[in-house]
Image (spheres, grey):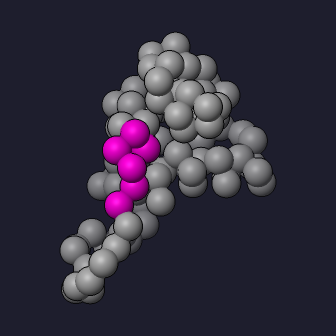
Amino acid sequence: MPQYMWLCHLYKHYTGAINILDVNNLDISVHKNKSGYIGEYCVAPEHWIDLDNLIFDRFSGETTVIEEINEYIESQSRVLYNKCIAQE
């Protein structure tokens, strides 16, 4: 699932500031090894991956709110904003 979708689900329950961190900077144990599962799996469409990268490149290591993220995406990549956020 794209990270942006996690942010949207979080926003349903929490509207305060969030910290965007690299997985290596989290204070929790995160399993980063490749799964042993061999078979079919879904890969997020490329525009969702591009959206996550845009967010990470701009907000990594910062505290922000979802509204600021959405405004940034709209100003920097109207195509990604329309495809992923506005769902046009």
Left or right: 43 as drawn, with respect to 72: left
User: Which residue is situated farthest in the front direction here?
Assistant: 88
Q: For the point 54% across and 38% down, which residue is it?
A: 84
Q: Give the residue drawn at x 39%, y 31%.
A: 54
- Point out residue 79 in the picture as x, y percentages from the top left corner: 47, 24
Magenta span of residues: 43-49
- Measured from the top left, where is residue 38 in percent x and y? 22, 85
Point 45% across, 16% down: residue: 76
Quarter of the rendering containing residue 52: top left
Residue depicted at x 54% and y 27%: 81
Q: Quadrant of residue 68?
A: top right
In the image, taking residue 6 as reference, residue 43 lies left or right, namely: left
24 relative position to 63: left or right: left
Can you say which quadrant of the picture contains the C terminus?
top right
The residue positioned farthest toward the top in the image shown: 75
Q: Nearer the viewer, residue 1 or 55?
A: 1
Residue 63 in view in this figure: no
Is 88 situated above or below 21? above
Residues 79 and 72: in front is 79
Rendering coords of residue 77 (x, y %): 45, 20
Q: Position of residue 71 (x, y in %)?
A: 60, 20
* Residue 37 seen from this side: yes
Determine whether 25 is above or below 63 in the image. below
| Along the line of sight, the residue nearer the viewer: 65 or 63 | 65
Residue 70 counted in the magenta span: no
User: Residue 44 magenta-drawn?
Assistant: yes
